[in-house]
Image: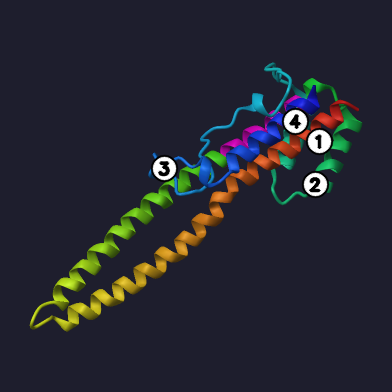
């Protein structure tokens, strides 16, 4: 059962990150080739219901600590497995308990992903504004250049402004391309976390 759900999730992640054919250009704030999925569902990543009763004491602290550790992108897979092993040795590995750990990691990474998607939208809108300013400056430059007695001081100013703005635009586009990969990387990390916790729960 877990294997079937895991394969379905892997297929879903590939669909979310697929370029070109999956693109939806109806959203002008989304410049990425990856399909925009604003919010993730924990039910697509964890095969069992997660208990909603609150834990208390050391166990609650341990679940929060492990969930937070697994959510840190700088923590590699070997470190993740070691942290899970230590938790299991101390507290066991029931499906409910592993589900609580995953829910904590999911909460943290999903919130981070939502902030990143919002930032991408802001960057896209900023790029649109900058492109409009560049076009306006080019239009003014062409108009002045066509005059019999052009204002060369203004042309110099416009030329410098266009060069500077185009450089900024290009640098931002490179940043957007990189940032667009981040939501997919977070999804893949969540998938890896789910796999590890499921493996621990199944013994």
Mark 3–mark 4 Cα distance, whole angstroms, equals: 30 Å
Instruction: Check if mark 3's residue and mark 4's residue have beta carbons within 8 Å.
Output: no
Instruction: Check if mark 2's residue and mark 4's residue have beta carbons within 8 Å.
Output: no
* Earlier residue among tags 2 and 3: 3
Disc 1 crowd, CA 10 A, few/some/many (<14, 14-19, 20+): some
Residue hosting label 3: 25
Secondary structure of residue under mark 3: loop
Residue placed at 60% from the left, 38% from the top?
15
Secondary structure of residue under mark 1: helix
Residue hosting label 1: 196
Residue 51 bears which disc, if any?
none
| Relative to 32, residue 166 above or below | below
Residue hosting label 4: 6
Q: Position of residue 145 (x, y in %)?
A: 16, 78
Mark 2–mark 4 Cα distance, whole angstroms, equals: 18 Å
Instruction: Check if mark 1's residue and mark 2's residue have beta carbons within 8 Å.
Output: yes
Residue placed at 40% from the left, 45% from the top?
29
Residue placed at 30% from the left, 77% from the top?
160
Disc 3 crowd, CA 10 A, few/some/many (<14, 14-19, 20+): few
Locate the C terminus and report the quarter of the image it occupies: top right
Locate the N terminus and report the quarter of the image it occupies: top right
Residue hosting label 2: 77
């Amino acid at each position: 059962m877990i294997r079937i759900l895991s394969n379905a999730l892997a297929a879903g992640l590939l669909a979310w990150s697929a370029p070109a054919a999956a693109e939806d250009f109806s959203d002008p704030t989304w410049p990425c080739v990856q399909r925009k999925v604003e919010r993730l569902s924990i039910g697509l990543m964890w095969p069992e219901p997660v208990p909603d009763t609150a834990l208390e004491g050391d166990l609650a602290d341990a679940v929060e600590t492990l969930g937070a550790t697994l959510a840190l992108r700088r923590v590699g897979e070997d470190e993740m497995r070691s942290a899970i092993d230590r938790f299991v040795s101390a507290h066991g590995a029931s499906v409910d308990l592993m589900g609580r750990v995953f829910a904590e990691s999911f909460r943290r990474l999903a919130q981070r992903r939502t902030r990143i998607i919002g930032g991408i939208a802001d960057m896209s809108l900023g790029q649109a504004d900058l492109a409009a300013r560049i076009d306006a400056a080019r239009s003014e430059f062409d108009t002045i250049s066509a005059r019999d007695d052009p204002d060369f001081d203004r042309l110099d100013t416009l030329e410098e402004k266009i060069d500077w703005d185009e450089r900024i635009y290009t640098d931002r586009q490179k940043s957007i391309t990189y940032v667009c990969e981040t939501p997919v990387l977070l999804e893949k990390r969540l998938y890896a976390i789910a796999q590890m916790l499921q493996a621990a729960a199944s013994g």
